[in-house]
Image (cartoon, coloured by chain):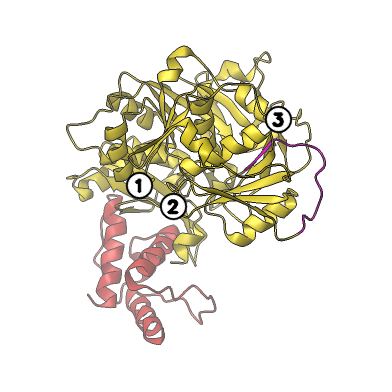
Amino acid sequence: MQTYEIIEDAIRTILTERDDEVPQLKPETQISASGLDSLDVAVLVVRLEDRLGTDPFKNGALARFPRTLGELAELYTQHSGLA
Amino acid sequence: MASGIEIAAFGVVAGGREFAFADLTAAAHGVDSSQVRSVAISVPDGPLTAAALLWVRRAGLDAVLLHADLRRTETEVLAQEMGCSHLLSGGADGNDLGLTLTTCEMAPQCRVNNRYGLGLLTSGTTGIPKLVTRDWQALELSVARGPQLQEARWMSLYPLTRFAGFNTLLHALCNEATLIIPRALQPSAILEDLCETSPTHISGTPTMWRNLLMTLPPGARSLPSLRQITLGGEVVDQPILNALKAAAPQARITHIYASTELGVCAAVSDGQAGFPAEWLETNSKRVQLQLRGDELWVKRPGCSVGRQRESSEEWTATGDLAEIQGGRVYFKGRRSDVLNIGGAKVAPAEVEERLSEVPGVLGARVLGRRSSIAGTVVVAEIISEAGTDEKSLRATIMKHCRACLPSYAVPRIVTFVDSLPISASGKILRADSERTNE
């Protein structure tokens, strides 16, 4: 799976595990419109660390927090590229 | 300070071999105690632990029983701290009975003039463990004795050089009974020894018991030789008590609340988790218990911490959280294990207990994982029963947790694992650093 697909899958897992409906997810979908609340985003980052082996938020100092799922995927791709 | 109690019928069974009292005392044959002031015991867990203690007891020496897995530098620091003039060590193989006495290389840092009896180490999860001293006679007087106990065969699931293991050894010794030492502290090895040696009394942590029950072959869910099962060292919940009752209906099941520092503070044998709330009010007992806020306090005579023999006739905070519910006091785990989830407090042991209530869950560990963007996230690791559908078990777990836990305490990530990491003293390891640093 590509980084984007892994992120989408992780979001689906979080939502289905608590019986929430999963909205249509696309790279343009805003993270705030993905059905996740702020704690869910924290959970997502922990899950992605397990699956992708990296946490781009760990050392703080991000110029800008990604807004869409596509931007989030790009951030992870860049980060694992650097690692 | 040798005690007058006769122990000549005491014996040890280890690794398929039997060691009679004479074999154990012969281990120290030719070891001269005349120049010894106090001795640090550094031997492998096994028959040699018993042999070394018998020698020290007979010679009436002050001694410190060191954990078998201490590093050499730690051994030296502790021997120095206790002013030990000598080191009593044994072969690398615990079944090779031979003890060697050497003088301590470094001069003792402080001269301890007063006698201290026996020094035991606390489990010390970080750094060098603390020392607690006990008087041999007081230790031996605290052991229950009875003619029926002479036939007993005690097995310890704890390393013998740790307090809980030492305590099992002491029970076998004082009753002139047999001590069974498992060849290894892995569930499969213990189970093998259990079948071969038919112990009547076993003591271990709930974690060890869970692991042992998981190893029992299906259909053979019984432990026929057992008359007494003892649990301690961690929160004992109702699911593990029920599981043990089912596996050994003939046995008495006792959970004890004890620590190396305070000794045994409560022993409960009514098959229920926690202990009766009346115990908080009775002042007639030697040990007094009190709930201050959410923490249990204990007042107990006759033990001291550190080098000096201090009286501890004072109330001590135990670091253990407890709560009264329906006339019973239930333990909620260690204060130091409590997770701060967005300002709310979550006791991992409490969440683990809820998880263990779900059919299909054999073991659970709850941790906090620091998230880089929003504090700590509650995560759970689950050992599931063989053949369980993990997807539907996960759904059941989440439903159960949401029904009986506040939302902040519900595990956000549930993973299935084959085993849970345990410490040398048989407790679940909890420090989330060893998880996040992987």
Magenta: main secondary structure equals: loop
Q: CA distance from mark 2 to mark 3?
A: 30 Å
**The residue under label 2 is which amino acid type?**
Asp
Q: CA distance from mark 1 to mark 3?
A: 37 Å
Which of label 1 and label 2 is nearer to you? 2
Query: On the image, numbered disc 3 is attached to which residue?
Result: B1
Q: Position of residue B150 (x, y in %)?
A: 45, 19
Please report the residue visible at 28 percent of the width from the left and 28 percent of the height from the top. Answer: B223
Q: Magenta segment, which residues?
A: B107-120
Marks 1 and 3: which is nearer the front?
3
Q: Which residue is mark 2?
A: B93
Q: Quadrant of the C terminus of chain B?
A: bottom left
Q: Pointer 1: what residue?
A: B186
Q: CA distance from mark 1 to mark 2?
A: 18 Å
The residue lying furthest to the front in this view is: B30
Which tint was used for chain A? red
Q: What type is the residue that disc 3 sits on?
A: Met
